[in-house]
Image (cartoon, rainbow, N blue to C red):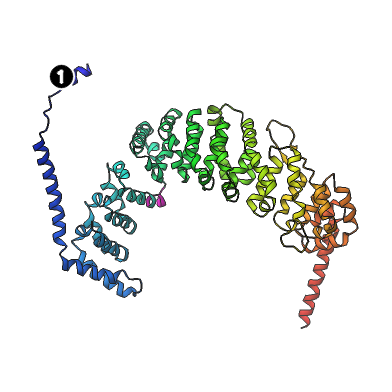
Amino acid sequence: DIEGNKNSDQVEEKPISASKKRKRSNSGHAKATDNQNRINNKLDPEYRLDIKKQWEIARRKNITPEERNKSISHLFELVRGNVSGLLFKNDTSRVIETCLKYGTKEQRNIIASELEGHLLEASKNKYAKYIVCKLMNFCPEYRSKILTEFKGQIKKLFLHTEARNVLLEAYELSNRTEDLNIKDLIAEDPSNKDKILKNLFQAIQYLIKKPESLNYVIMHRILLEYFTYSDDSKIREVIEVIGDHVSMFLHTREGSQVAMLCFSHGTVKERKAMLKSMREYVAKICKEEYGYLVLLRAFDVVDDTVSVTKYIIDHIVKPGVFKTIMQDKFGHRVILYLLTGRTRAKMYLSFETFQLLEKDDEVRAKTSKKDPIVRTNELRKAISPALINYAKENTVEMLSNTYMTQIFCETLLCGDANIEEKRSILENIPPLIGETSNENNIMLTYANRFLKILIQGQYQRLDNRQSEDKRVELHFAPLLFDSIKKDIIFYACNASASFVILALLQDKETGSEVRKILIKNLTGIEQAALKDVKSGSRFILKELGCDVTSLIKTLDDESNAKAKSNKRKREKK
């Protein structure tokens, strides 16, 4: 019936003749020419020269406020009533910008009122767009009027090369003062939710015609709003459209969250396509504040660890790239996550980051089939060979950088390699200790805390179903003890190195020998404990069975007696 009605109402359309097309075209061209001539007629050479001369004075940085105010007032009188005529030219548009920047509130409002009705056209001009941006900055009360002129044109403006900058400026300014989201719109009338989401989806479909639109934060915010309030099926529809472009929008906070959701909700095929699109930018993504989080999410949900290895890990361990990633604030977390899994990586991630990763675990349970522990072990096996080889050949370098030292330590504790391979790395450490006077002695640097961890081994719950923690036996204590035996008292009295000696004292392989040496030199250790209450010397004394409480009391008594003596001396004076 519908088709029948359409056919019955159909009227035969006559083709437009070529002559009529030419008339229409010529008419439009003539109208545009008249408008341009109208603008040009106002800018006679003498008038234009006066404006530019006055502008050269007003824009100087080395004039007094009084001189500037006087110059701006003169300049304003010249442009007043003709702002729209100066708007679209390279030199004269900058005059308007200067008036907005240095003018009074009243002058700015007059300029803004003259621009009403021209703002949509101005936003598309490569010179005038800057005036619209300045107007939003210096005349916030006109911001809503500007956006009103844009109403119904936002999607087209966003795809326009020049106008897009104006929209981005409007978004940034609005986002500073209010929380922009659709939550309140849905709360006002929940029945409108489907309509709002439908409009958002249509906007996404329209804007994605130009994939470069995905580079901008407004688009990221639109996508995040849509993902937040849509159901799984609607999210999947969008993933089909944007999945291949995931590498374009993971560099912002909102964009990275969208990319993480794409991995969480995506199918096996879509996840593989997303990984493939990221492979050329892996090194860059690893070192981005928000981008690296997307990789962590991929490690959590992608069952195809062969593809993860091929498209991500193989690009991380490339010569020349591997080192820069390990030394980066965010990049080293990617490697630690691959190496340790989420449970142990918790101590290297912020609480907020950990919560963000946990948030979509319910979705992962529906979309991923592989046991998380199996996935973690497979990724560990993939990254371990490169780390073991690098640690073996670059031990000095890895212990000279904080981030690399963390990776070095976790490689020995968690790396998928036999004890013989790890032993060859551990044997590289004692020669780096050197003399006690050497400032590069790793027993006296931040690296000593990792020496303590290597002595103690690792207590890690590899499987949440295990009732007991597992300890990794590296047998590092005897190696270290043999190299520092002659200086053990010196280190026992050092504020930070004393904790390494405490670990040797508690180790079953070295404990008895260390105890014998320390017992013979208690006096020096006691003095160190009294000198620095935060040092490990006090814990060493406690481990040796000394009465630390009495020692502290003695210290307090001596300190109080000294204070009273000094007070009496001052009173006598």
Q: What residue lies at 69% left-to-right and 37% top-to-bottom?
A: 416
Q: Determine whether, in the image, residue 526 is placed left or right of residue 153.
A: right
Report the front residue among 516 and 181: 516
Give the image location of residue 543, x and y in percent: 84, 51
Q: Determine whether, in the image, residue 37 is placed left or right of residue 543.
A: left
Give the image location of residue 33, x and y in percent: 14, 51
Q: Quadrant of residue 366?
A: top right
Give the image location of residue 496, x and y in percent: 74, 57
Please determine whether, in this image, residue 91 is positioned above or below residue 191.
below
- Residue 368 shown in magenta: no
Q: Determine whether, in the image, residue 526 is placed left or right of residue 439.
A: right
In which quadrant of the rendered image does the C terminus lie?
bottom right
Q: What residue lies at 26% left-to-right and 68% top-to-bottom?
A: 55
Please determine whether, in this image, residue 530 is positioned above or below residue 414.
below
In which quadrant of the rendered image does the N terminus lie?
top left
Report the front residue among 509 and 552: 509
- Asked if one can make out residue 181 in the rendered structure from this viewpoint, the answer is no
Give the overall secondary structure of the magenta segment: helix
Report the front residue among 217 and 330: 330
Label 1, residues with CA under 10 Å away: few <14, some 14-19, many ≥20: few
Q: Quadrant of residue 557?
A: bottom right
Q: Determine whether, in the image, residue 274 is placed left or right of residue 61.
A: right
Q: Quadrant of residue 211?
A: top left
Q: Which residues are magenta?
A: 173-178
Q: What residue lies at 30% left-to-right and 43% top-to-bottom?
A: 154
Q: Amino acid at mark 1?
A: Ser
Residue hosting label 1: 8
Q: Residue furthest bottom?
A: 573
